[in-house]
Amino acid sequence: MNVTIKQEGNKYDVTLEGRLDTTNADQFQKDITPLMQSGKSEIILDCTEMEYTSSQGLRMFLMLQKYVNQQGGTMEMRNMRPQVKEVFDITGFSSIIKIA
């Protein structure tokens, strides 16, 4: 999983590329830690190149969403591939995390 973060003020554009699973979830958590320390912010996750997420990946997204909610910020996932969106739909994460 490659993660690219671009910041403009309180807005973060995050590009996700590859697979998010148990082999790289720890690194992904390290990559997104600055987003969780930023306070109130707007986070846009571009999932155009995200190929897969496991339950461990879902846990990471849920953790980030909960933190953003606590800080009064917003988070949105965009451009999700159908096979990845299906995982979010089946698990109910589509009702927890905003997907555009």
Image (tube, grey):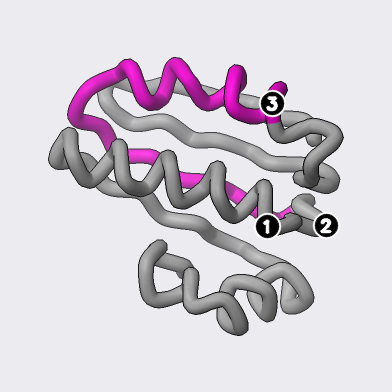
Q: Judge by depth and name the residue closer to the eye, 9 or 94.
A: 94
Residue 84 image position (x, y, % from top left): 72, 68
- Circle 1 residues within 10 Å: few <14, some 14–19, many ≥20: some
Quarter the N terminus occupies: top right
- Circle 2 residues within 10 Å: few <14, some 14–19, many ≥20: some
Left or right of 49, for residue 89: left
Disc on the earlier residue, 3 or 2: 3
Q: Which mark is residue 51?
A: 2
Q: Regarding mark 2 in the picture, which secondary structure is present there?
A: strand
Image label count: 3
Q: Which residues are magenta?
A: 26-48
Per the model, the C-alpha gap separating discs 1 and 3 is 13 Å
Say whether residue 41 is magenta: yes
Q: Are marks 2 and 1 in contact (CB under 8 Å)?
A: no
Disc on the earlier residue, 1 or 3: 3
Q: Which mark is residue 26?
A: 3
Give the amino acid at mark 2. Answer: Glu
Say whether residue 38 is magenta: yes
